DNA sequence: ACCTGAACACCGTTCAAGT
DNA sequence: ACCTGAACACCGTTCAAGT
């Protein structure tokens, strides 16, 4: 994809980025189980020890991959936000962006939310999750200020909305819900979330 | 734990069960990454090739482990169901049972909902998920018959409720939400689910 | 039927050595 | 600074052989 003018057999300009890109390719094509450092080095054209210079161990590469995943997801969600939209429409757009990413990056999503990340990366990971949910939080507080969302800790309410969304994403990523069904359910999901499962009186 | 009268060094009465139990122990204590067939065979006291007789390969053992997990989860949820209870109380009890299991078996839960199960087991797995959600589905249809839940495809509504719940469970299992916070949120979660996030009139 | 022990190909990680 | 190549300990899987 990237054709440089220097056709050297090894010695990338940016081996780290090349490794991450290659890792994500095999993650997408063959799944996490098929991801081996040695094969990754092989297909990238370096020795099997070269990745050590950029990632302390395999887990460090997986952690870095998860972080780039959150960055992309955050961009997707933020890009779908339009504060001028009415509440339900705005929330639906945010939810759809989240689910779209989840459906398009199922294996990556599983990695992003995997247990067993390095403890020293977990803070960055927590911040990354927060960052992705920021537009949801903003929407909740905006709507609360207008009296359109019930009172209560906005973080708590964001968690509920985010959980409902992530639950659908997780069901889809784990293969228990077809991608189309997940995406098609967004409208009803948001509607029921806002208006409740019990009937409303006139 | 199980002391038989036959102190033979090998040759279990039920190697298959012993392997599953041992696998779940290391899953709980050291995580999925530390689970190796060879070490499992070692600690179980058989040769490293013995497990092949009971599980075609490592994935087959993981699949079997996931299925036992769903069986236990299903029992826990069914055991917490009381159709005589009022709607919100009943749903809260079901939700708490699901979350309790998720919190107490975080690594197992991740395995249960992992991608990359053998295709030939995915049907059993789908049935297992359905089985665990059956009480939720029953509750929805019961309540719909009484006019206590909005009309609409009960499967769809069950999916939403289940997704909200599973989202919290997943956040907790992945370390983004402390176990206590997840369990403590059950009441509000169910309340907001039933009554909606927008204010109700009069 | 059930298990063993050797063999094979592969893996992650480490480290002295090269440029 | 960045990468190589050999080495080490481990792994999953297979298979002839034992009881």
Image: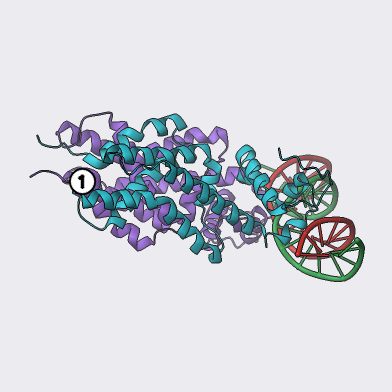
Chain colours: A purple, B cyan, C red, D green
Q: Position of residue B188 (x, y in %)?
A: 30, 33
Chain containing the residue with disc 1? B
Q: How far from the left and from the top, in percent, is residue A127? A: 43, 35
Q: Residue at x 23, y 33 (%)?
A: A141
Residue B122 in picture, x, y percent from top left: 51, 62
Looking at the rendering, which quadrant does residue A195 occupy?
top left
Given residues C18 and B155, the one toward you in this image is: B155
Q: Residue at x 14, y 34 (%)?
A: A146
In the displayed structure, would residue A156 be above or below residue A37?
above
Left/right placement of residue A55 relative to residue A79 reads: right
Q: Which residue is mark 1?
A: B148
Label 1 element class: loop
Count how many numbered circles sit on residues in the image: 1
Residue A31 visible somewhere in the drawing: yes
Q: Which quadrant holds residue A164?
A: top left
Q: Is residue A175 left or right of residue D10?
A: left
């Amino acid at each position: 994809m990237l054709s440089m003018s220097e056709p050297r057999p090894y010695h990338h300009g940016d081996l780290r980025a090349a490794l991450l890109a290659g890792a994500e390719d095999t993650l997408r094509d063959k799944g996490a189980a098929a991801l081996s450092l040695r094969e990754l080095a092989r297909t990238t054209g370096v020795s099997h020890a070269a990745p050590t210079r950029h990632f302390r161990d395999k887990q460090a590469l997986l952690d870095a991959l998860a972080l780039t995943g959150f960055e992309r997801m955050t961009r997707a969600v933020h890009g779908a936000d339009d504060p001028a939209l009415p509440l339900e429409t705005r929330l639906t757009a945010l939810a759809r962006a989240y689910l779209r990413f989840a459906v398009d990056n199922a294996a990556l999503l599983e990695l992003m939310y995997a247990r067993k990340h390095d403890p020293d990366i977990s803070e960055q990971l927590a911040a990354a999750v927060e960052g992705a949910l920021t537009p949801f939080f903003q929407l909740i507080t905006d709507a609360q200020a207008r009296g359109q969302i019930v009172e209560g800790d906005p973080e708590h309410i964001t968690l509920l909305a985010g959980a409902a969304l992530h639950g659908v994403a997780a069901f889809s990523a784990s293969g228990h819900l077809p991608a189309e069904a997940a995406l098609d359910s967004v409208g009803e999901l948001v509607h029921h979330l806002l208006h409740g499962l019990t009937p409303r009186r006139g």
